[in-house]
Image (cartoon, rainbow, N blue to C red):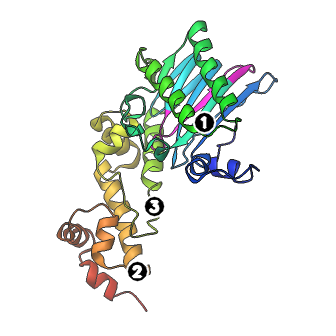
Amino acid sequence: MRDIDLHEDLKDDERVWMPGEIGKDVQRFNVFCVKHDRDEEFNCKPFNRKALYKISLLKGKTKLYYADKTVDFDCALLFTNPNIPYSWEHLESEQVAYFCVFTEDFFDQFMPIKDYPVFKPGNVPLFHLNKEQFGAFEDIFKLMLSEITLEFSYKYDSLRAMVLQLIFAALKMEPATFQPYKDSNGSQRIVSIFTELLERQFPIESTIQRMELRHPTEFANQLSVHVNHLNHALKAVTGKTTSQLIAARIMQESKSLLAHTDWNISEIAWSLGFDDLPHFINFFKKNQHLTPKLYRKNQPV
């Protein structure tokens, strides 16, 4: 199943003029339903649009891959945020799936959506459902699908309330228990997802863009693993520690910015997540044996 690009799906949607606030919400929320009963299964590759949160209601035998763990389920509610890669594989041809996707600023007037436990790093985002629970959540999604088609001035406020209803109902339930990933090398999988999380932050293309994940503990939290486990996996596969891999990628980007932009060194330091200029200068000099200023000066014109 292809990734859903919220903006591409909506920009060609012909609709009457709407007031500014509603028009903004058209670009920040959508809801979908997929029912599949053919012989071939549809699977989900990592949903990694930077801007989008996603809630999925899934029915049919499925295996979810999440960091170095897996879980099998028949019916479940899944919460995913833009920073944690995941994928799933359907194990039978008959499936029903509902999705709603939205941006963080869709909830500007509420508590920040990323602060709800179902979207926080380190928490289990999957909830097993029985037949009755699935039916209750399905009713909410069906109401969303109906609501989004209405010509109603407050429909996006109504849809926000339904999303919160999904979240609060899930928080009253026990999350699923994940098992170690045994179908292939778990360390290889951690390395793959760590690399994706690291590389997704680059290239730095603007002085207002900033690296958000810089420290091993931050990556470990995103992957829902202990930092020692992350470090062990990376060391076993790459021969380098988590800190060494992060530092090498920051150095690569810093040299590119020094060579190919006219940004001042303070702007580069801030974009790469350094809180003060001396820290960046010391980091660069330790790894390159030159200050950033001298490195830039030595670049060919």
Residue 191 on the magenta span: no
Question: On the image, which quarter does residue 68 sit in?
Answer: top left
Q: Determine the CA span between mark 3 and mark 2.
A: 16 Å
130 vs 110: above or below: above
Total numbered badges shown on the rendered structure: 3
Q: Earlier in the sequence, mark 1 or mark 2?
A: 1
Query: What residue occupies the far right of the structure in this picture?
Result: 38
In the displayed structure image, the side of residue 42 where residue 222 appears, left or right: left
Is disc 2 placed on a helix, strand or loop? helix
44 vs 180: above or below: below
Q: Which residues are magenta?
A: 80-96
Q: Which residue is mark 2?
A: 259
- Give the percent coordinates (x, y) of residue 103: 51, 45
Residue 241 seen in the current view: no
In the rendered structure, which amino acid carries the disc numbered 1?
Answer: Lys
Q: Which residue is mark 3?
A: 202
Residue at figure coordinates x 47%, y 64% from the top left? 203
* Residue 224 or residue 3, whichever sits in front: 3
Quadrant in the picture for the N terminus: top right
Q: Earlier in the sequence, mark 3 or mark 2?
A: 3
Residue at figure coordinates x 69%, y 49% from the top left? 10
Q: Which residue is mark 1?
A: 155
For marks 1 and 2, give the one nearer the viewer.
Answer: 1
Residue at figure coordinates x 57%, y 33% from the top left? 159
In the rendered structure, which amino acid carries the disc numbered 2?
Answer: Ala
Contact (CB < 8 A) between labels 1 and 3?
Answer: no
